[in-house]
Image: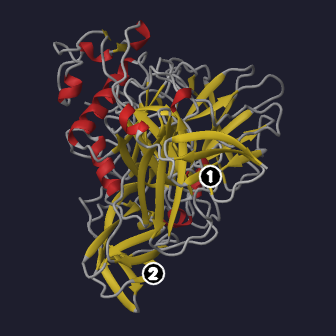
Amino acid sequence: MKKAFLLSVVFAATCTAFAANPAVDKNDAVKFEKGLNAPTMKKAPARASDSFDFSYSQGITSLTKIQGVTGGVTRAYMMFELSPEDIKGLAGDKVTGFTVYSPSDNNMKNNPINEGRFFYSTDLLKEDYTQDFTISKIPFEPNKIVLDEPYTITGKEESLFFGYSIMVPKADNIYYLPFDDYPSYYNGAGLFGISNSDAFPVDFYTMAADLGALSMSITLEGKNFPFHVDFASISDVICLPLRKNSTFPVTLCATSDTPIKSVEMEYTLGGKTYVTNCGLPQEVPAGAAVYFDALIGFQAQKEKMNEVVDFKITNVNGKPNVSSYAEAQSTVVVVKEVPVHQTLIEEFTGTWCGWCTRGYAALEYIKENYPDFVVAAYHNDDPMQITTRYPANISGFPSASLNRGLVVDPYYGTQTSSFELPIVGDIKALNSIATPWVVKVDHEWVSEDELVAKASVSNIAGFENKNYKIAYILVADGLSGTGRSWFQSNNYATQSPQFIPQLNAFCRGGEYGKGTVSGLIFNDVVVSTTGIYGVDGSIPATLASEEVAEHSISFDLSKISSTLIPDKNKLRVIAAVVDASGNVLNCAKNEVNDFSTVSVSGISDENAPVEYYNLNGMKVSDPSNGIFIRRQGNTATKVILP
């Protein structure tokens, strides 16, 4: 069964400086359901013949939202720039055609734009060649066009752009352009430009750091093809266990006319230079910009260390690797015990969403089989919704984010693992990456309606002048209701059982095998957004190696609907370290199952020490000039201090 159409919206830079330009909005999530099947780019084998498709995109995984504004002429440009290595490697080949994918309107059902203009250029000030073409009216349909005048790549071009443009319809209509938001290994893989006229130059453009890779390929004829392997991503900090041989994962990107069977890497650690043949889970297929994971091998180190290490990909398939992106740097820390890494899994769902039953089933499967996983579910447009300001950019439901970076389907994940529930493979892969962060969280009842989450964090490498924060989430289990808004819409009622048992129950003949399901129990539901995006000042800007920082935050349960907390013994607090971009670096959870009238009343102690907290729940050692929460044992009151 194919996974859903992944539509994790990625947006271009906001163009407020141009009144006639399309409005590009990064915060509005599109409410639509993501079904089972979707078109994907299927690139021809790189050297199956003397003609092949070249693209930096692996498919359509994201959409760029663009909104037409009345007044003036607006042309949107989508393009990619060949990397210097690829220009040289393709020297002598001819570009004879291209394939682009139709845009879509806001409903994902029609394409109102039928005229496009292909171009290539050696700079961004002019179009060296243009050719008009007709775009299919079917959203995301491939449009394969043959060029009237092929272009021969000389290999001497300083830069070379290929792309297409469309006239953006006026008025406040919303359109979507297909991109691939998998992290690109260089900025030229996806460019988005806007022109206030019907021709170059563009008034501004944004790089792939915002968009990813353009879902477009060019058809090449010739016998030449680039050959190089580059770093796509490597962790800022690599944690290794003391006195043990170990490996560490890294993501690489290959462009090759033959399968990649071996990758050799060189680095110096502890004054000694090592050469390692990276472990590959499987042979990497030939093609352009093919991403794959590899394992860097590390020999056991006898002493603790903390040093910056340079890595270089030296040989591929026994041949020298020639690339401008073959080098990377990371801080390697050797410690006695590597911290436990937990991925934060955040799901986005709604009872109105018929395909969201697979997300519901996935979370129930995880709760039963992987109880250590850290999970939080955000509801949309149903009785469990508390916010639409989500900590990840999503465009439809169901969706899930892993560590607030990678947006995937909550059931299929990236669809690269063989686990019974595919997303488990993605979670385990992320958990296997060592982290320098140690995160612990506990809780304390202050009163019947005040729950304090108490976090402690440390970094085994230490850091200076960084903006890290602690984000807090309060989730609840056991939610249910009787109104129709609690009924789960179910599109799987017509599907044959072929999934995990929890989803098969929603299929034809299953316990919940009908179009609308009542009486479900919802777990892992986010019930408070207090501190959810990271509390300012919760982690010092500078922290020494293994120094512990403590912080706490208060949840006022009286402000949360009783419907969302049916049982105070079925709560869970989550604490996560987030970086300046909002990405989660590590997290932990703590079960709240000790609430009772007796235990809370037992907190009171007139001899207990007095503690003060500000209104954000942060502990204050020397309070003055403001309103504070004074706590002594079980008693908590608001006080005004001079």
The image position of residue 610, as x and y in percent, is: 57, 52
Does dot 2 land on a helix, a strand or a loop? strand
Q: Amino acid at mark 1?
A: Phe
**Disc 2 packing (10 Å; few <14; some 14–19; many ≥20):** some
Q: In this image, 401 relative to 264: left or right?
A: right
Pick the front one: 575 or 583: 575
Callout 2, which amino acid? Asn
Label tally: 2
Instruction: Name the foreground residue: 161 vs 48.
Output: 161
Q: Which residue is mark 2?
A: 306
Residue that appears at 19% across and 13% down:
508
**Residue annotated with mark 1:** 161
Which quadrant, please, contains the N terminus?
Answer: top left
* Contact? badges 2 and 1 (CB < 8 Å): no
Q: Which mark is residue 458?
A: none
Q: Earlier in the sequence, mark 2 or mark 1?
A: 1
Where residue 126 appears, as percent x and y from the top left, is 75, 49
- Examine the rendering and report whether any part of residue 405 can be seen: no
> Looking at the image, is 349 positioned above or below residue 419?
above
Q: Residue furthest bottom?
A: 271
For the point 82% across and 37% down, the residue is: 18
**Foreground mark, 2 or 1?**
2
Q: Quadrant of residue 616?
A: top right
On the rendered structure, is 36 left or right of 155? left
Instruction: Using the image, determine if residue 625 lies above or below residue 505.
Output: below
396 w.r.t. 587: above or below: above
Question: Image quarter for residue 25?
Answer: top right
